[in-house]
Image: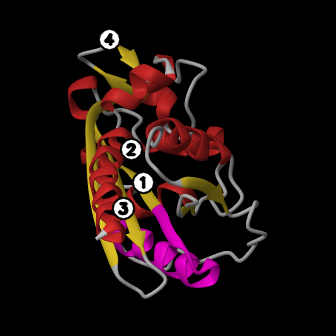
Amino acid sequence: MSMPKLLLATKNQAKAQEYLLLLQGLPFELTNLAEQGIDTVVNETGETLEQNATLKAQAYASLSDMLAMADDSGLEVDALGGEPGALSARYAGANASDEDRIERLLKRLEGIPWEGRNARFRCVIAIASPGGKVEVCHGECQGIITFNAKGENGFGYDPVFYLPEQGKTMAELSMEEKNKISHRGLATRRARQVLERHIAQQKE
């Protein structure tokens, strides 16, 4: 009997690689949008991470006729009233690079002292079936926004997200270290439980 497929509904290759590691050992054949020939872009029109993740998961589950997993992640900075939040990926414009987004963030925080730069990464994963049923999992990681980017690993805002307990930015951690403590790692551990339950229900 062949393994059921799980569609990783992301076009971000760095994120897809993280998920391949985080989902290792699950009895699913992991596939992605490119492998399925899906080039439809689902616009993130939701106002929250939860809404955007759900929108993407349900749309791609319907398009592919398979179980789909999508996420939306965001950085929330207390001094900016929770910005950039759900707009994290588009904070410096639609086609901006990670460097552009970091530059805008650091500019917005100019003059804010270290003790006022508290922030958190949040990740929401939605798992949707072709029939429309969706389950949502959350993960959160606390940190501080640095004054300068540091580290070559990771992506997004990782180089300016400092983890006091590790004494490093997220971008200075190895992939293994990051997956243990990151918002995406925490959300995926909860998602694994949902996926394991899905497999068990299929066997009943």
Q: Locate residue 78 relative to residue 35 in the image: left or right.
A: left
Q: Is residue 63 magenta?
A: yes
> At which x and y percent is residue 71?
45, 60
Circle number at residue 184: 2
Name the residue beneath numbered marker 3: 199
The Cα–Cα distance between marks 4 and 3, rounded to whole angstroms, is 39 Å
- Mark 2 vs mark 3, foreground winner is 3
- Picture quadrant of residue 162: top left
- Picture quadrant of residue 197: bottom left
Closer to the chain start, of discs 1 and 4, is 1
Identify the residue at the far top of this view: 167
The N terminus is located in which quarter? bottom right
User: How many numbered badges does the structure rendering display?
Assistant: 4
**Amino acid type of the residue tagged 1 in the rendering:** Ser
> At which x and y percent is residue 202?
36, 70
**Amino acid type of the residue tagged 2 in the rendering:** Arg
Name the residue beneath numbered marker 4: 167
- For residue 154, above or below residue 134: above
The Cα–Cα distance between marks 1 and 2, rounded to whole angstroms, is 8 Å
Asked if residue 101 can be seen in this view, the reply is yes
